[in-house]
Image: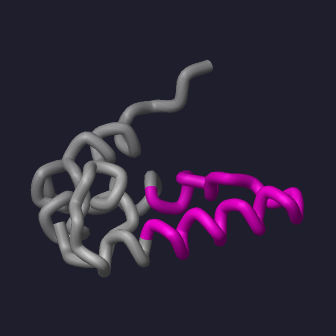
Amino acid sequence: MPHGQASCADYGCPRAGYRQAALRARRRRDLDRVQGLAARVDAAPAALRAAVLVRRGMSAQDIADAAGIAVTLVRRLLRPPEA
């Protein structure tokens, strides 16, 4: 995981960069909440892009590696929406 990501501090990393990123992220979430903004973004554009990449021959693991995210997240994007 790259240094300075907010989630690292949640797992107890003592590095100042992680703690500072976590504080910035928490402040941003709090401000968004006060302003009534959604806590999440629409995943549809990413899901469409992931589907295109799979049709072109990439695996979920390939996409995850290229994006620097967990393969589980890519697999969730590729899963059809529940009705």
Of the 4 image quadrants, the one containing the C terminus is top right
Magenta region's main secondary structure?
Answer: helix
Seen in the image, is 36 located left or right of residue 66?
right
Q: Quadrant of residue 50?
A: bottom left
In the picture shown, does residue 7 fall above or below 68?
above
Say which of 5 and 70 sits in front.
5
Q: Is residue 60 visible?
A: yes
Where does the image place residue 53, in percent across and percent down from the top left? 26, 61
Residue at left 42%, top 77%? 20
Residue at left 54%, top 53%? 43
Residue at left 17%, top 66%? 1
- As for residue 54 lying within the magenta part, the answer is no
Where does the image place residue 34, in percent across and percent down from the top left? 86, 60
- As for residue 34 lying within the magenta part, the answer is yes
Find the magenta span and give its range.
22-46
In the picture shown, does residue 21 fall above or below 29?
below
Q: Quadrant of residue 25?
A: bottom right
Where does the image place residue 5, in percent across and percent down from the top left? 33, 70
